[in-house]
Amino acid sequence: MKIVVDWDRCEANGVCVRAAPESFHLDDKDQLQILTETVPPELRAKVDKAILGCPKQALSLSED
């Protein structure tokens, strides 16, 4: 599974970073960075929580 970001919706508010810091990071310019594009099984629950918690619904998973 791969993390997909709808960059037009993303506000980089950091909810995903707090839910899954191993997979998401805000850089010095408050731009979202994806640290683990392909989600390993051990991080799936955290990434799912980040996706569900995104207030702008900018995150999803793809089977690519």
Image (cartoon, helix red, strand yellow):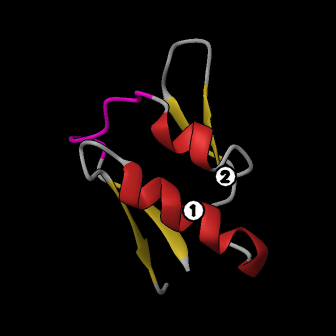
Q: Quadrant of residue 11?
A: top left
What stretch of residues is rendered in magenta? Answer: 7-13
Left or right, 58 with respect to 19, comes to left
Can you say whether 63 is above or below 56 in the image? below
Q: Position of residue 55 (x, y in %)?
A: 28, 42
Q: Does 12 lie within the magenta span? A: yes
**In this orientation, does residue 34 appear?**
yes
Crowding around mark 1 (Cα neighbors within 10 Å: few <14, some 14 to 19, many 20+) is many
Can you say whether 41 is above or below 10 in the image? below
Q: Is disc 2 placed on a helix, strand or loop? A: loop
Q: Position of residue 19 (x, y in %)?
A: 59, 47
Say which mark, if any, is on residue 23. 2
Q: Residue at x 49, y 54 (%)?
A: 50
Q: Residue at x 63, y 73 (%)?
A: 44
Q: CA distance from mark 2 to mark 1?
A: 7 Å
Q: Nearer the viewer, mark 2 or mark 1?
A: 1
Can you say whether 49 is above or below 11 in the image? below
Q: Amino acid at mark 1?
A: Val
Contact between labelled residues 1 and 2, with CB atoms less than 8 Å apart: yes
Q: Quadrant of residue 26?
A: top right
Which residue in the protein does label 1 denote?
47
Q: Closest to the observer: 18 or 27?
A: 18
Q: Position of residue 35 (x, y in %)?
A: 68, 49
Q: Amino acid at mark 2?
A: Ser
Q: Residue at x 62, y 71 (%)?
A: 45
Q: Closest to the observer: 29 or 16?
A: 16
Sequence-wise first label, 2 or 1: 2
